[in-house]
């Protein structure tokens, strides 16, 4: 594919930005077009049998408060066409090796293919082959039901009531985020810990809270070679064997979620207690795979299945909807519009939902590990900016911390606000929910309409020298996502997949490989070398004076 800036739609958008984009005033656009909301709002509906609402759940994506006209959207769609977004999407769903730097298919949609469409990689039916998607799902169902019912017992015959998932990156963030998001559905008699950091505090605190007789360890690692995970897992194993005086049965208390059977076996886990998946599942897309076992244990298989089904519904929308109606495509194109034509460097995602408090952290890996790339498909550097810095926190908290900058700072921060119409906790007769919703609506409105100097003065009693400080420029774009009911498993699945395919669309336009992550390797290699040097005499070799100086100081102060 060609670099994005060589496409004619790109130059067309540049001209359009100069003539229209730069001058669009959103509040005026709303005044002059009463149908603007309808024109730029899109909806998916999740069917009743999977959704949390008895009549199905609508999820509304309101793109109308973005700096676009109908012409902008047409031109962005043209860019997607010229960049081959549909062709690339179809290649992904056909199991082609679109992860071209690793020679792999990108086939995580198969993991949530609950309607069992034929899906093949290298001619192999990934759904029904031995060890394939359906077989692993069935293993997850059986195992989770055994653990949840108490039929699966620890080495002293007790029910397992503590689950410690040891994993990092995609083997941690998905399970953490989803179990938090679906806490309402979680088994109340289960305690979950997620240990990811190599900082010994993380595993030590989880172990301190746990009883070896009732603890189940899930060692979650696609490669089973990640230093943090293998070290934490070995520490857990040593703790388990010490605490049980060597009587503890690893087979009853440790299972592996991985693609690497030989490393799993070396660690001492019986392959019968391994839940596998394939190399075509990227780490950041793996919550749908065996890596999601903690989710299944916590919320139960039926809920996990609904989670997959909601994701599948969004996959189908992405596959079938024409580009101009295609919700993740529009989201991705807007990101391109702001990044490449307005110079925006960031993207804020603020869920107005406490259960979604880890959603932004999850999206950081999804987006930034996928599209934090410079090199395009022909091996040359992109001459345009690529993946934005994604950040966020739940609201209303974020409003009381960094929203100052979003409202009055010098940077353009395209923002997504997410709200569910219904709360799982309608306490105080829904007072909290109504206040939450009023903030969700007010923030997007305030960011758009702003406040002029005249309006500040009209409020009265404002000293003239304070007027400029109280002005809000407004015209700051937001996308408002409204779940027309509760956020249950299916709704959450669909929301995640919206962002997955938004990220796909960005990468497809930018002509980069969204599916490798070479950028995480260098630091790992250097850390290995330095780890050795900590145990050797001196302050290492071949380092710059800062690294060498700090290494020496660390050893001296730490007594190493
Ligand atoms: O699951 P694994 O193999 O232990 O990998 C964990 C994480 O390791 C990181 O180094 C990768 O950048 C992530 O993509 C990955 O999710």
Image (tube, rainbow, N blue to C red):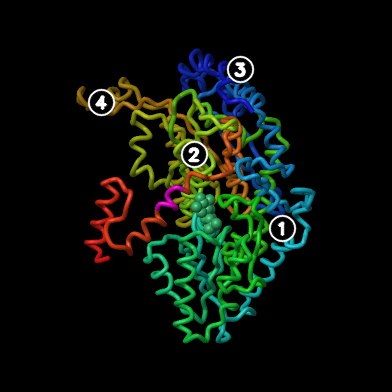
Using the image, determine if residue 186 lies above or below residue 311: below
The residue carrying mark 1 is 133
The residue carrying mark 2 is 372
Viewer-nearest residue: 252 or 224: 224
Using the image, determine if residue 91 lies above or below residue 69: below
Is residue 123 in the magenta section? no
Depth check, mark 2 against mark 4: the one in front is 2
Picture coordinates of residue 117, whole percent (x, y): 78, 49
Depth check, mark 1 against mark 2: the one in front is 2
Q: Secondary structure at mark 3?
A: helix
In 3D space, how far apart are the residues under numbered discs 3 and 4 (Cα atoms)?
52 Å
Picture coordinates of residue 454, whole percent (x, y): 31, 20
Dominant secondary structure of the magenta stretch? helix
Q: Which numbered disc flags the more N-terminal residue, 1 or 4?
A: 1
Q: Is mark 1 within 8 Å of ligand 1?
A: no
Viewer-nearest residue: 487 or 504: 504
The residue carrying mark 4 is 460
Q: Which numbered disc flags the more N-terminal residue, 3 or 4?
A: 3
Q: Measuring 51% from the left and 46% from the top, which residue is drawn there?
A: 363
Question: Mark 3 and 4 residues: CB-CB less than 8 Å, in contact?
Answer: no
Q: Is residue 99 visible?
A: yes
Q: Quadrant of residue 408?
A: top left
Is residue 525 in the magenta section? yes
Using the image, determine if residue 246 lies above or below residue 168: below
Q: Quadrant of residue 400?
A: top left
Q: Secondary structure at mark 2?
A: loop
Where does the magenta region start and end?
A: 522-526
Q: Which numbered disc flags the more N-terminal residue, 3 or 2?
A: 3
In 3D space, how far apart are the residues under numbered discs 2 and 4 (Cα atoms)?
48 Å
Using the image, determine if residue 524 lies above or below residue 19: below
Q: Measuring 53% from the left and 73% from the top, which residue is drawn there?
A: 189
């Amino acid at each position: 594919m060609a670099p994005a800036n060589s496409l004619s739609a790109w130059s067309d958008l540049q001209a359009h930005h100069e003539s229209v984009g730069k001058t669009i005033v959103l509040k005026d656009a709303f005044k002059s077009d009463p149908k603007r909301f309808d024109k730029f709002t899109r909806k998916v509906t999740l069917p009743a049998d999977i959704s949390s609402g008895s009549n199905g759940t609508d999820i509304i994506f309101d793109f109308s408060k973005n700096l676009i006209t109908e012409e902008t959207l047409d031109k962005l769609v043209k860019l997607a066409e010229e960049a081959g977004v549909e062709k690339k999407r179809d290649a992904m769903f056909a199991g082609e090796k679109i992860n071209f730097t690793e020679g792999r298919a990108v086939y995580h949609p198969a993991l949530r293919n609950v309607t069992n469409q034929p899906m093949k990689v290298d001619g192999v039916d990934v759904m029904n082959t031995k060890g394939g998607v359906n077989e692993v799902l069935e293993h997850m169902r059986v195992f989770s039901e055994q653990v949840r019912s108490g039929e699966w017992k620890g080495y002293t015959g007790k029910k397992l009531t503590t689950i410690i998932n040891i994993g990092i990156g995609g083997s941690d963030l998905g399970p953490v985020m989803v179990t938090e998001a679906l806490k309402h559905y979680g088994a109340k008699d289960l305690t979950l810990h997620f240990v990811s950091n190599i900082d010994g505090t993380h595993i030590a605190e989880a172990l301190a809270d746990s009883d070896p007789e009732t603890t189940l360890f899930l060692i979650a690692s696609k490669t089973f070679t990640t230093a943090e995970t293998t070290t934490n897992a070995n520490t857990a194993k040593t703790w388990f064997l010490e605490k049980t005086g060597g009587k503890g049965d690893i087979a009853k208390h440790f299972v592996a979620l991985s693609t690497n059977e030989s490393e799993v076996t070396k660690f001492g886990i019986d392959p019968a207690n391994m839940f596998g998946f394939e190399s075509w599942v990227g780490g950041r897309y793996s919550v749908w795979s065996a890596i999601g076992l903690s989710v299944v244990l916590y919320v139960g298989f039926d809920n996990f299945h609904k989670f997959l089904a909601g994701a599948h519904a969004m996959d189908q929308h992405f596959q079938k909807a024409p580009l101009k109606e295609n919700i993740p495509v529009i989201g991705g194109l807007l990101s391109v519009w702001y990044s490449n034509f307005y110079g925006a460097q960031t993207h804020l995602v603020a869920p107005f939902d406490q259960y979604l408090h880890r959603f932004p952290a999850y999206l950081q890996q999804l987006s930034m590990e996928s599209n934090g790339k410079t090199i395009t498909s022909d091996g040359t550097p992109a001459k345009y900016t690529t993946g934005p810095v994604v950040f966020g926190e739940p609201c209303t908290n974020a409003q009381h911390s960094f929203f100052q900058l979003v409202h009055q700072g010098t940077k353009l921060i395209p923002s997504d606000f997410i709200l569910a119409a219904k709360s799982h906790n309608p306490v105080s007769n829904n007072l909290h929910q109504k206040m939450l919703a009023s903030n969700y609506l007010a923030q997007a409105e305030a960011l758009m309409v702003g406040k002029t100097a005249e309006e500040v003065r009209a409020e009265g009693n404002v000293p003239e020298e304070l007027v400029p400080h109280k002005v809000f420029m407004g015209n700051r774009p937001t996308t408002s996502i409204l779940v027309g009911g509760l956020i249950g498993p299916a709704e959450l699945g669909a929301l995640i997949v919206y962002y997955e395919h938004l990220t796909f669309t960005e990468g497809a336009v930018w002509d980069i490989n969204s599916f490798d992550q070479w950028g995480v390797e260098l630091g790992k290699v250097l850390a290995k070398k330095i780890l050795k040097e900590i145990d050797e005499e001196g302050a290492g070799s071949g380092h710059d004076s800062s690294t060498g100086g700090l290494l020496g100081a660390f050893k001296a102060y730490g007594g190493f």
